[in-house]
Amino acid sequence: MDLQLAEKRVLITGGASNIGRGIVHGFAAEGSRIALCDYDGDQAKRVQAEAMELGAAETVVIESDLTVDGAGASAVQQVVDRWGGLDVLVNNAGWSLGEFLAKDHDHDRWRKLVDINLIATIETTQAAVAAMRADDAEGGNVVLVSSEAAFGQIRQGVYGATKAAAVALARTVAREHGRHGIRSNIVCPGLVMPEGPGAVGGKSLWAGGNDDVFNPNQIDYLLKDTPLGRLTLAEDIADAVLWFASDKAARQVTGQLIAVSGGYTMP
């Protein structure tokens, strides 16, 4: 199916590494115009080059720390200034390191999780909705990349709480702005391991190696409870995001959530 995403103006936050990189690749293959927002400029430029090779109509890198006040709004405005509007926002930027709730007393870490996973998403979404509601706009699509931790997972209490809050945000956007032609949906990935060193930058939480984030014993434990018995790939997440973003494929779909994890959770 032609998803009719060619030339669409797409802003992808956290687009430089792992899942975000996969999403950039997906839109590139559809011929979209892509603004890749990430705080790792070097990795973002590498992914930008990959996107052009895959067929993107145009790409631009926005090197930005979205936890800085005004950064999300600025990223949206840069897209509007360059291309005259915004068709798709993919809220993918996020951060997590697991810890058991009973041991997690680091308030600074809590605040960092909230700042990256929730507050930055709120600001960027507000700005995107305003652009999609502009007089000459025809609506648009917001896709929020949440997490299966939003449903409650071991060692992911605070992180999961921020991701659950983001799900509520996405559904509020769907209810409040459907009349403006804006759809808003959520993709909840399972564990996605980087496909190799080139899939992450030096600032990624995966930069120290996969074992620093998820070791083989944890992976084996997860796979035992995964009906399909295999790990999720970045391209699996990208496929779901592109489907939601397509007015051809998902014209009547809003406020919905898909878990992409091989059946590890079935919300």
Image (cartoon, rainbow, N blue to C red):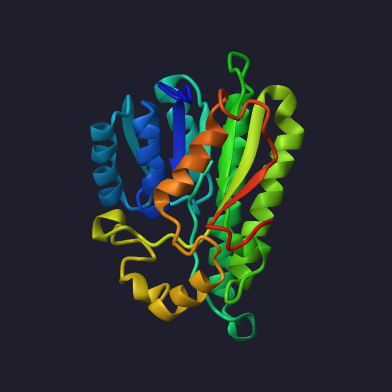
- On screen, residue 19 versus residue 263, left or right, reads left
The residue at the far front in this view is 228
In the depicted structure, whether residue 124 falls above or below residue 136: below
Write the residue at 48% across / 44% down.
71
Decide which of 167, 202 is in the foreground and name it: 167
Where's residue 159, x and y in %?
59, 66
Task: Answer whether residue 64 is visible to the viewer in this image.
Answer: no
* Quarter of the picture holding the C terminus: bottom right
Write the residue at 35% across / 70% down.
210
Write the residue at 29% across / 57% down.
201
- On screen, residue 187 versus residue 81, left or right, reads right
Where's residue 148, x and y in %?
59, 60
Task: Answer whether residue 47 is visible to the viewer in this image.
Answer: yes
The residue at the far top in this view is 136
Q: Quadrant of residue 26?
A: top left
Where's residue 21, x and y in %?
36, 47
Write the residue at 47% across / 41% down.
239
In the depicted structure, whether residue 81 falls above or below residue 223: above
- On screen, residue 217 versus residue 243, left or right, reads left
Where's residue 253, x and y in %?
67, 33
